[in-house]
Amino acid sequence: AFWLAEMLRLGILPEGYIYPKEERPLRDLLRKRGHLVRLRTSLVNSLQNILSRNLGRKVNVNDMKVLKEDRISPLLEMNEDLALAGRVSKEAIDHLTQQIYKIEWAVQKKIALKEEYRYLLTLPGVGKILSLTIMLETGPINRFETVGDYVSYCRKVPSQWTSNGKWKGSGNTKNGNKYLAWAYSEASEFARRLYPEPRAYYNRKMQKANAAVAHSALANKLSRAGYYVMRDQVPFRPEKLFG
């Protein structure tokens, strides 16, 4: 206890952030939504593989997720076993989609985006649910002194030890907030698909490396932009990030 008090007096004892108790249930509910989204994605990928192997082509993901109509089972009706696999997968995907919508509806009814986080909606790939996720996982942005601290907390920087330009190992890649890491990864994927500037940046990175590196680089960019729009209370400007 004396040693802790002395470190605190000297200002060299790192202090943890205690999340407000009243907001924890909603934060955990959005974490559960993220878990369900990942489960649904694994089912969609599995079903996509079944269709690709047996039909020789890919099927639009939105056709798999649509709730009002089963567009998958008729494609596999040439074989009873394949039809059953497709029907079971589709029912599981639909059930998860309904639960995801239920959580989104409940969260949006109980909490709205706070004034200091309103500009998160201007980030490419960030909608209402992702902005709420980022807000609840980030907490007060002023607890991060620099953009590097925030991006590191989001797990969007490489953890490497180097000496004289040589690689000497890596740090703990599990430090930071895995939910923020997931949120900005999701935003990166949506931004790449829907916005021209992020897509052009992604394509440039992919030419130099590969898709995984390009995706991580774009997520890093978006997390840096998220820090500044929250700290400075300004809308996102693509020319400053991708110019």
Image (cartoon, rainbow, N blue to C red):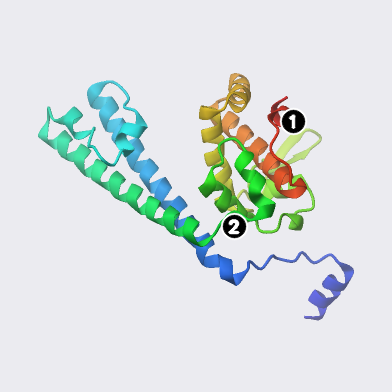
Q: Residue at x 38, y 48 (%)?
A: 39
> Of label 2 and label 1, which has the lower sequence position?
2
Relative depth, front residue between 183 and 214: 183
Give coordinates of residue 86: x percent, y percent. 21, 37
- Looking at the rendered structure, the secondary structure element under dot 2 is helix
Q: Is residue 104 above or below residue 224?
A: below
Splitting the image into 4 quarters, where does residue 223 fall? top right
- Indicate left or right for 105 with 73 as reference: right
Q: Quadrant location of the C terminus?
A: top right
**Image x and y of residue 185, in percent:** 55, 40
Q: Residues within 10 Å of mark 1 (few under 14, many from 20)?
A: few
Distance between the Cα atoms at labels 2 and 1?
26 Å
Mark 1: amino acid: Lys
Q: Where 53 falls versus 131 (above or below)?
A: above
- What residue appears at the point 85 percent right and 75 percent down from the top-left corner? 6
The reply to whether the C-beta atoms of the residues labelled 2 and 1 are less than 8 Å apart is no
**Residue 160 point in image, percent of width and height:** 70, 42
- List x then y, in percent, for residue 184: 58, 42
Residue 161 visible in this rendered orientation of the protein: yes
Left or right of 185, for residue 146 = right
Q: Is residue 182 visible?
A: no
Which type of secondary structure does the marked residue at label 1 adopt? helix
Residue 240 numbered tag? 1
Q: Residue furthest right?
A: 10
Give the position of the N terminus as an image quadrant: bottom right
Task: Classify mark 2: residues with Cα within 10 Å, few (<14), some (14-19) or many (20+).
Answer: many
Looking at the image, which is closer to me, 119 or 91? 119
Q: Which mark is residue 136?
A: 2
